[in-house]
Amino acid sequence: MKKSVLTRYRVMAYTTGVLLVLLCLSMIAKYGLDISGAADMTRVIAIAHGWLYVVYLVFAFDLGAKAKWPVGKQLWVLLAGTIPTAAFFVERRISRELDGKIADRTPAVAEA
């Protein structure tokens, strides 16, 4: 597995996580605090999160398929983008796990 597969998953995990936290904050502003303009902000963030979550799903599924994860682990990673802040914790755990595997497979560079 190439490091680029992990990198693009990590980028989308952070993007999805940040947008989901922003969405939660904007919904609190809209419904809890009744701030004017929060409805427009909520709509924009919700649309962005929805579309980028689909990209996250594709990249996470591709990563899981290449890492040969069992179905349960794959679902756990896929659902992380729907729980606020979960994407950050899951991404960190997956990155630590796969960084070691990618490093083990990288051939040593011969020094001159």
Image (cartoon, rainbow, N blue to C red):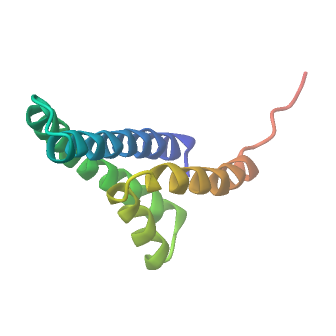
Q: Residue furthest front?
A: 33
Count how many numbered circles sit on residues in the image. 0
Identified at 20% across, 47% down, the residue is: 32
Tell me which corner region of the image, top left, top right, bottom left or bottom right, holds residue 3: top right
Identified at 24% across, 52% down, the residue is: 54
- Nearer-the-camera pick, 86 or 10: 86
Tell me which corner region of the image, top left, top right, bottom left or bottom right, holds residue 94: bottom right
- Nearer-the-camera pick, 10 or 21: 21
Could you tell me residue 47's position as x and y percent?
14, 42
Relative side of 100 to 32, left or right: right
Relative side of 45 to 82, left or right: left
Relative side of 18 to 96, left or right: left
Q: Residue furthest top?
A: 112
Identified at 69% across, 55% down, the residue is: 101
Q: Quadrant of the C terminus?
A: top right
Could you tell me residue 7's position as x and y percent?
50, 40
Could you tell me residue 19's position as x and y percent?
31, 40
Q: Is residue 37 above or below residue 92?
A: above
Q: Is residue 49 above or below residue 68?
A: above
